[in-house]
Amino acid sequence: MTMTCDAGKENCIGWAARDPSGFLSPYQFNRRAVGADDISLTILYCGVCYADVAWTRNVQGHSKYPLVPGHEIVGIVKEVGSNVERVKIGDHVGVGTYVNSCRECEYCDEGLEVQCIKGAVLTFDGIDTDGSVTKGGYSSYYVVHQRYCYRIPENYPLASAAPLLCAGITVWTPMMRHNMNQPGKSLGVIGLGGLGHMAVKFGKSFGLKVTVFSTSLSKKDEALNLLGADNFIISSNDEDMKAMEKSLDFVINTASADIPFDRYLALLKSGGVLSLVGVPSEVKFQPINLILGMRSISGSVTGGTKQIQEMLNYCAAHEIYPNIEIVPIQYANEALERLINKDIKYRFVIDIANSLK
């Protein structure tokens, strides 16, 4: 589906995909005017997420072109509406995976806007309340309602903040929901990419015993020595997996490849939880493995506005930083290809301010 640009002078520059090839190139378009409750921020950095691959290439079949991706946005406030009190011009702020919601349902009332009954409006390729299609952070600036804009603590490096707004909050939310911030508990992390490495960092900060599971022996050194995990196991090693049975309080699956669910359920203690944040093609397991151990399988997406701000504050206070590779916007297509090939430790961040002209 192709959308036409608004009439008039195009006031924002960015990079967009025009078709399902996903190839990005320079693009000019309009942002809406700043409303009474809006913030306009000059974008300095934007993280690169696998969603950028999926949407630019129309993997789910509903992408609207031209499509400007990017939902890990960090910048500086350049204009505020008359009702804005939370931030002021010059503040460091971030925008995550959604930029609007109904603000009336029980979930919005609880600060869980990502679960909005009417559906949260995505930061890119969403339909906003005025009917326009949202365009993401591979661009020069963004206009957003103040509710969906987060303060980046002044002492926190802005480039490092970008991946927190999707990768970070995606693992933070289920860990907090299942009380996995209590020292001494045992955490299993499946997959060691953008999400998995943040789960390890949070786990170690919370005082958990962290075991990383991977299909690749090449990840062992980085898991143990770079990220500080306590244990590393190749998931195809039957003997090592057997030795871990009934030892973990919580396992978070950050991988999108299919996994042997029964094998991982066996690792959980009674009442343990296997949480899915990666998206396998199917979920297949023997029900008895849930029933006998009182175990659960749960899903999670990003987080509510309250949770996102709490996570940002925690990361600043405890000096938790994603491992990033900073690239110019002109490298965006190569970055997406490298992301597909898992050739990144662990998150690309685009230097918008110094490369988008």
Image (cartoon, grey):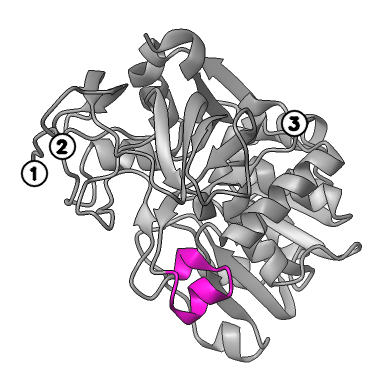
Q: Is residue 140 above or below residue 290?
A: above
Name which of mark 3 and mark 2 comes first in the sequence. Answer: 2
Viewer-proximal residue among 101 and 287: 101
Question: Circle 1 sits on which residue?
Answer: 1
Question: Circle 2 sits on which residue?
Answer: 65
- In the rendered structure, the answer to whether residue 255 lies left or right of residue 89 reads left
Element marked by disc 2: loop
Q: Is residue 118 above or below residue 175?
A: below
- How busy is the neighbourhood of tag 1: few (under 14 within 10 Å), some, or many (20 plus)? few
- In the rendered structure, the answer to whether residue 242 lies left or right of residue 120 reads right
Are circles 1 and 2 on residues that touch, CB within 8 Å?
A: yes
Task: Look at the image and tell me in which quarter the N terminus lies.
Answer: top left
Viewer-proximal residue among 285 and 165: 165
- How busy is the neighbourhood of tag 3: few (under 14 within 10 Å), some, or many (20 plus)? some
Horizontal and vertical percent position of residue 154: 75, 32
- In the rendered structure, the answer to whether residue 31 lies left or right of residue 290 reads left
Element marked by disc 3: loop
**Residue 233 visible in this rendered orientation of the protein:** no
In the image, which residues are magenta?
103-115
Give the residue type at disc 1: Met
Name which of mark 3 and mark 1 comes first in the sequence. Answer: 1
Question: Circle 3 sits on which residue?
Answer: 156
Q: Residue at x 47, y 76 (%)?
A: 285
Are circles 3 and 1 on residues that touch, CB within 8 Å?
A: no
Element marked by disc 1: loop
Mark 1–mark 2 Cα distance, whole angstroms, equals: 6 Å
Mark 3–mark 2 Cα distance, whole angstroms, equals: 35 Å
Q: How many marks?
A: 3
Task: Look at the image and tell me in which quarter the C terminus lies.
Answer: top left
